[in-house]
Amino acid sequence: MGRSGANIYENGLDVGEANRVALTPLTFIRRAAEVHPDAPAVVYGDVRRTWAQTYARCRRLASALARHGIGRGDTVSIIAANIPELFEAHFGVPMCGAVLNAINIRLDAQSIGFILDHAETRAVIVDPEFADTVEAALSFVHSDDLLVIDIEDDTFDESSEPIGTKTYEAFIGGGDPDFDWQMPADEWDAITLNYTSGTTGNPKGVVYHHRGAHLNALSHIVDWGMPKHARYLWTLPMFHCNGWCFPWTMAALAGTNVCMRAVRAEPIFRLIETERVTHFCGAPIVLNMLGSAPEAPDGFGHAVKVMTAGASPPAAVIARMEAMGAEVTHVYGLTETYGPAVICDWKSQWNGLSADERARLKARQGVANTALDRIMVTDPETREPVVANGEQLGEVLMRGNNVMRGYLKNEAATGQAFRDGWLASGDLGVVHPDGYIELKDRSKDIIISGGENISSIEIEDVLYRHPAVHEAAVVAQPHDKWGETPCAFVTLADGATATADEIIAFCRGNMATYKAPRTVIFTDLPKTSTGKIQKFVLRQRANELIADQPEP
Amino acid sequence: MGRSGANIYENGLDVGEANRVALTPLTFIRRAAEVHPDAPAVVYGDVRRTWAQTYARCRRLASALARHGIGRGDTVSIIAANIPELFEAHFGVPMCGAVLNAINIRLDAQSIGFILDHAETRAVIVDPEFADTVEAALSFVHSDDLLVIDIEDDTFDESSEPIGTKTYEAFIGGGDPDFDWQMPADEWDAITLNYTSGTTGNPKGVVYHHRGAHLNALSHIVDWGMPKHARYLWTLPMFHCNGWCFPWTMAALAGTNVCMRAVRAEPIFRLIETERVTHFCGAPIVLNMLGSAPEAPDGFGHAVKVMTAGASPPAAVIARMEAMGAEVTHVYGLTETYGPAVICDWKSQWNGLSADERARLKARQGVANTALDRIMVTDPETREPVVANGEQLGEVLMRGNNVMRGYLKNEAATGQAFRDGWLASGDLGVVHPDGYIELKDRSKDIIISGGENISSIEIEDVLYRHPAVHEAAVVAQPHDKWGETPCAFVTLADGATATADEIIAFCRGNMATYKAPRTVIFTDLPKTSTGKIQKFVLRQRANELIADQPEP
């Protein structure tokens, strides 16, 4: 196509310092502090800090780390609840060239030790709530040069002994608030390291880069329609995929980060009102908690937008949040895609549909966000795209600038994750005729019964429609004749009663009979720190049970 | 800082197709068409097209150009009013790898001929309104292989003869609506070529790249708080810095482009109402026209945001628009910065100030937008940043991804534009204590009287406050004793009267005496096609006049 050889645009029009600047979210906080120095950046209990103050603290942190000899390509870990210090680390650590490793606060000492060791961490910043666990974790670390920094938190009411050599305030107090931090040498440089909460084997360290963090943070603004100075409540764990990139989004908007130690209904409802919160994110399990909380208000006094992901939110949960006046947006992503990279982009013509129809549309994961280049669902055998008929199941593949660089020091796993120029998600889904994808299951969560694929999510959706059901999860149970059959674990709503037979009958009345669970167990559901139900635990339990197996 | 040599993030974490995709605004229209195929994309008279239809037409255009042998690094020119074909060209031309050159519709035949020749244009698409001029321009073109394509426009009521070999509809009718267009090989590839309307010498061809177009288009969404599906009225010429990148912004938002051939008050007010326009842009001269139009409504029936630039908008013009209910945002940029790259980012605490104080703050150009990395004002002699005191004058420098690659085939001019890693704007300004910049003049528009710098803009601001003044422009006039003195050209408002002495007395009463104009000429003001007053014409007239020069 066209003429070969050099064209007129290939001479004398070179990259220079004036017209090529590395993309990084670090420029967002500099701009927020310079343009809106007095605007509120962080609120936490009695702490209220402006963008100028927060930026100065981030620069002090970067300066103190640099003075300690920490720089480009070094890892700095932190284990903390959603408190200001964790927000600051998202800027202060990469400002000295280092890579931020925010650790899941629910992990046990051995897992934390593995991560600190694997990441070759040079320093770890510790929230007092997790000091004992981290202290135990340190025995698994081989480095003899690990700097341990204790956060002090006046609002945390349990006393704990410091385990490090410096407090966070003393450490950053020795740093320069005017530190001349450096832009990343290359926008491909690592900015953060997030370990997946793998259910088997050792966790894998997902490496994010500055370019992807910049672009995914902006994408939220475009796709969620976020205004300047939005007020964001930190219900989503900030350690989880860097809070889906929202620390950086909030800096780009010069908005307010409303921090919170414990995700409970009372402080959430209180802060939404007192801080006039406009946006928050959370797993469906968090929305479920809010919807069923006794202190739930009839409605919020102002517009609130909620983003949810982590599992397909049951229609009933969406309906409950909307009844309170919140506009729910459903998104989907992986740790490997900087959190959400797919969004159920809402169409105004859907507003006229029935509540059931709207909930059905909203339960779909949707389309690539602005930062993600492409999403594709392919047949696992032929590797051809599935037919967009809402029926043919395939694996979800993604590509774009918000796809990870790879897994740290794990070329085998990196090689497996990337396939023919795409990231393989391990999730199974369909494409609807309008191009929106809908997940049907994790590859490993699909139930294959008599040769038929049964989606555990589809059964769960029916279970959630039963009025007595508070939470539900379905896994495969081995079966001599059928191979596998669905086994449901159910938590009943407070004060509600139901028998297993009633639940099974309800399912058979609302879906294909062969898909209905053969077994129903009433129990509390085991969950990960991010609120995901731990299906591998349930799968073990299902294996151990002798199933009650009536013929279909 | 840190350890030397390779770090753990430098191995096994390589760029691949899955995680590195070229930034380009072309992905925006693909996403709009795939996700919101039925949403309105373009409205023009009786023409209403969806995003699916518009995308198909862009792909047809790209396909037809490719079949004609046009591809990477070739130039395709277009000369058209703000009609759908010009919008389509912003996508269809780069989709075949070519570079879009949208030409100023007010240029004379010789200037157009120079541009077509200099750009080595392979094809030119011609609006019937400008067919005669382009036909005359073709005689200046040396290529014997230039494809000329005639747009037909039913709503254009003057008949004209086709000058090319194909109509636009026939040409794209031969193209493939499913054309498999290619992403740019590199995000640094040229996407458009915009000739500056230089007042002396030949125009210079400013080269934009895909990366900068993508980022500046997104920056408008963040900085102007634009929602999904915004409805944008095309009052700003789309040929002017690619409509400040708004064709691409509107695709990213899947919004509606309300097109318009002639920028007159009646259709603007009508379309704002009937198409429920939410956003439009225009030079202060356009806002002035709207504010003083007899058909101006008391207020718009819904929220309207207006972005203005091109010259510092007089406070009175801002006040008039705000009285009609429009929220005015002041921006600043150059052809060399993809249009606006600087924004007077509004602070909520300013809302409580008096109307005069608000107008004074809003007349400042402001701060770097999200896409621009940095703005700096330096002393022309020492090259050190000026003191942020609102007083010390210096030259405005900028750097960022929304700075041009350079001038096409003009390394000398490119070399002059870039200085020590910055783009030199040629504009003079001050930095206020809050970091906001305010332009005082173009370098060449400053008046130096008795060794003192006098800002022509400052005098114009005072003149606009006089109730009888409709428009005003001030230039330097040679003076034996003082070197230069200010000479004012004034257009009086309809039905208003004033004498030169009254105007001078008003100025002396409202500013330092030595800054007041010595001469006032009542006349219509000569303007460029983008509404900028042509000061070089006024300067010539001032030279020719014998000034009336009372002692100060």
Image (tube, coloured by chain):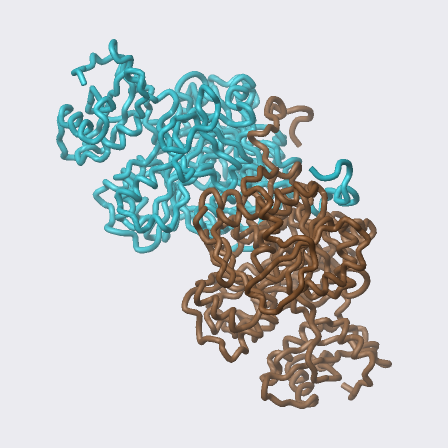
Chain colours: A cyan, B brown
Front-lying residue, A47 or B191:
B191
Q: Which residue is drawn at 66% across and 53% down?
A: B166
The answer to whether residue A324 is visible is yes
Residue A54: x percent and y percent? 51, 46
Q: In which quarter of the image is the N terminus of chain B?
A: top right
Residue A484: quarter of image: top left
Residue with the most extreme top position: A480
Q: Is residue B416 left or right of residue A337?
A: right
Front-lying residue, B536 or A338:
B536
Residue A49 lies, with reference to residue B18, above or below; the image says below
Residue A457: x percent and y percent? 31, 29
Residue B437: quarter of image: bottom right
Front-lying residue, A180 or A46:
A180
Q: In this view, does A153 lie to the left or right of B347?
A: left
Residue B401: x percent and y percent? 65, 46
Q: Residue at x 80, y 59 (%)?
A: B139
Residue A437 lies, with reference to residue B80, above or below; the image says above
Q: Is residue B132 left or right of residue A392?
A: right
Q: In this view, does A412 lie to the left or right of B336?
A: left
Q: Quadrant of the C terminus of chain B?
A: bottom right
Q: Which residue is drawn at 36% across and 44% down?
A: A306
Q: How many labels does the image show?
A: 0
Q: Which residue is drawn at 67% across and 67% down?
A: B529
Front-lying residue, B299 or B354:
B299
The answer to whether residue B435 is visible is no
Residue B360: x percent and y percent? 57, 70
Residue A180: quarter of image: top right
